[in-house]
Image: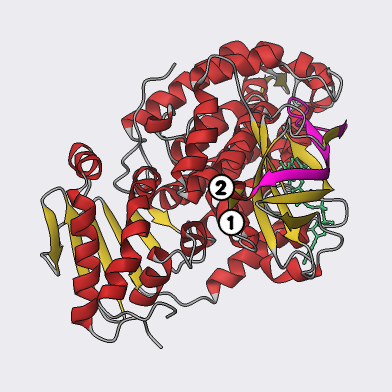
Amino acid sequence: MLDTSPAEVAGPPTTSLPPQVGALRDCVRTFAQERLRPEVQRLDRADAADFDWDLVAEGHRLGLTRLVISRAHGGLGHGELGVAVALEELAAVDAGFALVFGATMLGQAPLLLSGDPALQARFLPLFSGDEPVLACNAITEELAGCDLLIPENAQYALDVMRARRDGDHYLLDGAKKFITNGRVATYATVFANIEGNPGASALTCFVVPLDSPGVELGAVADKMGYRTCLGTEMTFRGVRVPAENVIGGEGGGVVINVQQMNMARAAVAAISTGVARGALDLARQWCGERIQGGVPLYRHQFTARKLAEMSTKVDAARLLYLRAAHLADTEIPAPAYEPAVAKLFADRIAVEVAEEAMSLMGARGYVRDWGMEKYLREALGARIYEGTPEVLALAITESMYATDDDF
Amino acid sequence: MPAYTSREQAVSVFSQLFEIMLEDDAFRAIVRDEALSVRFVHTEPDFELYVDAEGVRVDGPAAPTTLAIKMSCDTADALWNGRLLMPIAVATGRIRIKGSVARVIEFVPLLRPAFDRYPALAAAAGVPTSA
Ligand SMILES: Cc1cc2nc3c(=O)[nH]c(=O)nc-3n(C[C@H](O)[C@H](O)[C@H](O)COP(=O)(O)OP(=O)(O)OC[C@H]3O[C@@H](n4cnc5c(N)ncnc54)[C@H](O)[C@@H]3O)c2cc1C
């Protein structure tokens, strides 16, 4: 297990990381390169519903399931910066494996935000046991996708999962879709609308143990990438949830969700940066070895230009996510602008870099055994969750026109 | 109507609140052991409280603190009275915090006893209960 204490960051870590974060990065990099990499082809080709608990258990032993949990609850007390650099390392090898832990942290975030010692004491120590415990965050539904992520559109969301007060409990009815870890999590943070309110205008966040009667775990989506993590359908039929499991009160769901996204987007940007870096590493190696026209590919000026552009994009994406993570670690509420900018840019360059890297490998880039085309499939994934480019654009322009004081 | 009609009234209630909190051995021990210092920036009426293991100071020198927490006195009243939930207050920016978020996550649950103590303090100072 890592022995790290929380990062006290003095300024945006543009050139060097705080020592604790650097130690975390080195440890996760070694794990990703030495332990995860040899398994990647197998993980990518496995059936959609296969889940490698043994590898996840190794990640758990490194502390990846409890990075953001405070030391008082048995965690490592890292912030978004630690999370982001760790997820970049994992995603440079396998984005789906990174998201297993990213989704768990999303399920932990509302509990951390709650400031509720009783709720925290019930759920957070679960992650410090010998066996791996995962969480998930359940928002997306069949008819309500981005409408649940754009606050102004919550009112238009169709047929949202319902919550009805019943004495000192709530009854949840509805279904969720594409929920990462839904099949393998111990509990979910679930967003449901209080009955009688239009759309998702009274969206509310519930912590729901997944062994509760009435929870049914359905099909796992057969995704084109991110195959190491499971995106699951979850149905809730009259699931009784105690009122003390509500975070942020009735109708608090939209703001909790926005805050959660603002905290998480730096980490998703780091995942995209990792995917781009992984593709670039492979292309760099190939272009150094492959001889055409009598010289290694990188000596051809067209190729050199491409590699230089790709490297510049990866560096810029990393700087943007480091800035965003630094702000998310030092300001509450987490800012909307910098994490959205970081994610928009990193998601875009991941696709560009992976596509370019693939073309630099010629036919081999198109063949699964060489491991390159997987980066392109995974680059396309992060453009969907935690804000599509369109959702991010709305968050960015909203911030561009906001006024603020200088606190 | 604002909860607080004068600066003196607000200073008195909020400084008493944190003095009482510091009388609690467990709270004071954590503040001391973790070397926590918090600058509460209250607005409308405007004043600042500095809270650390040494005690509570009003408008003290602006020494660097571990955390700075800014909110209006109305927000503070709604918060400590339980009408405004902490996660909503922070997520909507009615409460804004600067400092290590990891420390905030550890610190906020420690404030729980303030929710029990505040209503009586405010009532004794003549703050309307439904402000
Ligand atoms: C790998 C992966 C992991 C995921 N994990 C989770 C998870 O753990 N939990 C969870 O809840 N969900 C998860 N999702 C689901 C994801 O969050 C949603 O797919 C996403 O929010 C988009 O919703 P949708 O698919 O219904 O698309 P839609 O909302 O139908 O959007 C379709 C298109 O329309 C655009 N669009 C929608 N509204 C607007 C608008 N107002 N203005 C402009 N354009 C608009 C979108 O940008 C998009 O391009 C995951 C998805 C993937 C791919």
Instruction: Say whether residue A176 is left or right of residue A120.
Output: right
Residue A337 picture location, percent across and down: 53, 61
Amino acid carrying label 1: it is Ile
Instruction: Say whether residue A164 is left or right of residue A85.
Output: right
If the image is split into quadrants, where does the C terminus of chain A sit? Answer: bottom left
Residue that numbered label 1 is attached to = A256
SS for dot 1: helix
Instruction: Say whether residue B59 is left or right of residue A398.
Output: left
The secondary structure that most of the magenta stretch takes on is strand
Residue A354 lies in quadrant:
top right
Q: Are marks 2 and 1 in contact (CB under 8 Å)?
A: yes
Amino acid carrying label 2: it is Pro
Residue A170 picture location, percent across and down: 71, 51
- A245 to B75, vertically: above or below: above
Residue A96 picture location, percent across and down: 70, 29
Mark 1 lies within 8 Å of ligand 1 (Cβ measured): no
Q: Alpha-carbon neighbours of circle 1 within 10 Å: few (<14), some, or many (≥20)?
A: many
Q: Alpha-carbon neighbours of circle 2 within 10 Å: few (<14), some, or many (≥20)?
A: many
Give the spatial CA distance, label 2 vs label 1.
Answer: 7 Å
Q: Is residue A225 magenta?
A: yes
Residue drawn at (59%, 15%), measured in percent from left and top? A131
Query: Chain letter of disc 1?
Result: A
Is residue A300 at least partly visible in the picture? no
Q: Nearer the viewer, residue B116 or A323?
A: B116
Residue that numbered label 2 is attached to = A110
